[in-house]
Amino acid sequence: MEEIVVENLETRSKEYVLDEIMKQYGQEILQLTYSYVKNRTVAEDLTQEIFVKCYRSLHTYNQRAKLRTWLWRIAINHCKDYLRSWYNKHVVVTEHESETIGTSKETVEQAVIKMDEDEKLAYEVMNLPDNYREIIYLFYFEEMRLKDIAEVTGVNENTLKSRLKRAKELLKVRLEE
């Protein structure tokens, strides 16, 4: 699918190409931004901004890296810029979301226990320092290889291995408490 999008960069309109990119990577980018900001509303706004940046920068994509890597680089940098921004440090965004439990084959009790465990894991991952949370998210949730993560983040692969090991150790300690 990525090849189709890349091929269309030259022949189709930017709007068409952006639409295809959004269809293919929209959910991934939303999840990535959420892993940084921990707020769905803000993550949705940042995702829109990221795709606007992508639209404006399509002409600069030189195909040396995969399209996904290029887009993730934009997204990660945008999230980091947001986290350093005045707005993030001084404006409080609230979010109200109700959750429901799906009980198709599980009992309600099992569903509640599983949801509690999942919430605890997600909570602990989201409360890791940024550099550890980033590696855990990309490695486990996006199933990226260390080589790809190194390319996307611009961090040495051996440094990423050390961060991954340290992040797992931190999670283990926190989850055992």
Image (spheres, grey):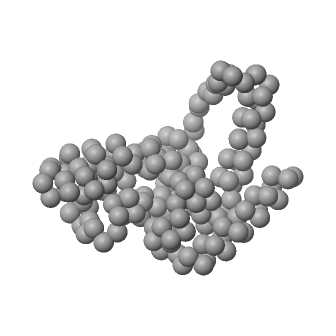
Q: Nearer the viewer, residue 10 or 3?
A: 3
Q: Residue, x 52% and y 60% (percent of image)?
A: 144
Q: Residue, x 72% and y 47% (percent of image)?
A: 121
Q: What is the number of callouts on the image?
A: 0
Q: Residue, x 67% and y 47% (percent of image)?
A: 122
* Residue 140, image quadrant: bottom right
Question: In the displayed structure, would residue 76 be above or below residue 95?
Answer: below
Left or right placement of residue 146 versus residue 21 in this view: right
Q: Is residue 101 visible?
A: yes
Q: Position of residue 54 (x, y in %)?
A: 30, 56
Q: Position of residue 102 (x, y in %)?
A: 64, 24
Q: Nearer the viewer, residue 143 or 25?
A: 143
Q: Is residue 137 visible?
A: no
Q: Nearer the viewer, residue 40 or 145?
A: 145
Q: Position of residue 43 (x, y in %)?
A: 48, 46
Question: In the displayed structure, would residue 83 be above or below residue 160?
Answer: above
* Residue 93, image quadrant: top right
Question: In the displayed structure, would residue 154 be above or below residue 130?
Answer: below
Q: Residue, x 26% and y 61% (percent of image)?
A: 57
Left or right placement of residue 152 versus residue 117 in this view: left
Q: Residue furthest toward the right?
A: 177
